Amino acid sequence: MLKSLLLNLSSSSWARRIIMGWSFSRRAASRFVAGDVLTDAIKVIRRLNATGLLVTLDHLGENVTKFEEASAAARDYIEILNQIEVTGVKSNISIKLTQLGLNIDFEGCLDNLRRIARKAAESGILVRIDIEDSQTVDQTWLSFRTLKDEGLTNIGLAIQSYLYRSQEDARALLAEGARFRLCKGAYKESADVAFPRKADVDANYDSLTEILINSAIAAGAEPAAPDGRYPPVAAIATHDPKRISFARKHADRIGFPKHALEFQMLHGIRNDLQIMLAEEGYPVRVYVPFGTEWYPYLMRRLAERPANLWFFLSHLLRY
Ligand code: FDA
């Protein structure tokens, strides 16, 4: 109920205006968001790298309504790639297709993605496409396939265990050489397309974990690149200790090496677990968002965990 309300608010423009107008909201968001500008994010990446963690950098923004904004986002990402190269930080990038204009002009969005992927390819960096609401899934797979056919193989995908279709999609795309970040799914979806019960989402997560790891071992269990730019085929993105334990046990059972099993978590959540897994020898990548468009990202983080709402409101009380 509360989750549903918060997810509805995440796409509401009036709620956005009000909540972004409260200065304590920005302070609350800073738990999850590295800062407003790229230099803030680079500082955070350096700190994380120093503790053995890799990063994927996200310039916040989604569902843009003017194509100029989409083109500006693509230009920003090209500058981000420049800075990753110049500073030598261990990071790749994550992008959202609706930030690159997916809802306005598919061909234009594809062209923005193409320019980013070409630039990233020059430095051996993977571009991970975040997966958004279920309406965007077909076009996301189409973007990957189109650019792969053009020779751009440095594009990674993400897949959501709450969608009924995901096992079928994962099998088909893995056979085409896709590499995946597996997550549970953060958007509001109907029971027509997504499991309504958390237990089913979790069970499907474990099944998808098996599919990903089995496919990665069949493909040679390629390790994560030491410079942090290229992840292995299977990336398990969750803070859920049971899902992490399942992935580890399955990998051990079939002799899948630690260096080929990447765990991913969000900046500001379970840093203790991130460090513990990295110390055990797994590649661990932290998703670090930065920028001023933090509102929908913050609302999704609040929706995932009701306790975060109290954390948010505590900033109001301190105000
Ligand atoms: P679950 O929600 O069951 O939480 C397990 C435990 O983790 C909780 O009990 C709590 O301890 C901790 N936890 C989880 N969320 C928390 C929060 N917000 N604050 C504090 N503690 C929290 N989704 C999507 O649809 N498309 C995408 O591309 C991505 N990308 C992505 C990248 C990475 C690196 C991660 C980790 C996650 C995503 N997600 C995503 C989000 C994902 O779908 C999901 O909503 C969240 O990860 C929360 O689910 P968990 O798997 O952590 O499990």
Image (cartoon, rainbow, N blue to C red):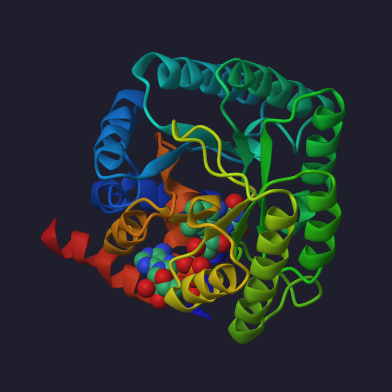
| Residue 39, quarter of picture | top left
Choose top left, top right, bottom left or bottom right for residue 305.
bottom left
The residue shown at (36%, 60%) is 277
- Within the image, what quadrant is residue 69 found in? top right
Where in the figure is residue 280, as x and y percent of width and height? Answer: 35, 60
Q: Is residue 41 left or right of residue 304?
A: left
Q: Position of residue 289 (x, y in %)?
A: 42, 41
Q: Looking at the image, how many numbered discs can be counted on the residues?
A: 0
Question: Residue most toward the left?
Answer: 318
Between residues 85 and 159, which one lies in front from this camera angle? 85
Near-viewer residue (29 or 80)? 80
The residue closer to the viewer here, 198 or 221, is 221
Rendered position, 43 above or below 267? above
Q: Is residue 316 left or right of residue 59?
A: left
Return the x and y of residue 45 as percentages of the image width and height.
Answer: 32, 35
Taking 103 as reference, is 285 left or right? left
User: Do we see residue 95 in this rendering?
Assistant: yes
Q: Residue at x 53, y 75 (%)?
A: 249
Image quadrant where one finds the C terminus: bottom left
Q: Is any atom of residue 6 visible in this view?
A: no
> Percent x, y for residue 311?
26, 67
Q: Is residue 176 above or below residue 254?
A: above
Residue drawn at the location 33% of the way across and 32% of the way down: 41
Vertical position of residue 298 compared to residue 75: above or below: below
- Give left or right: position of 83 versus 173: left
Judge whether 92 appears above or below 51 on screen: above
Q: Residue furthest front?
A: 255
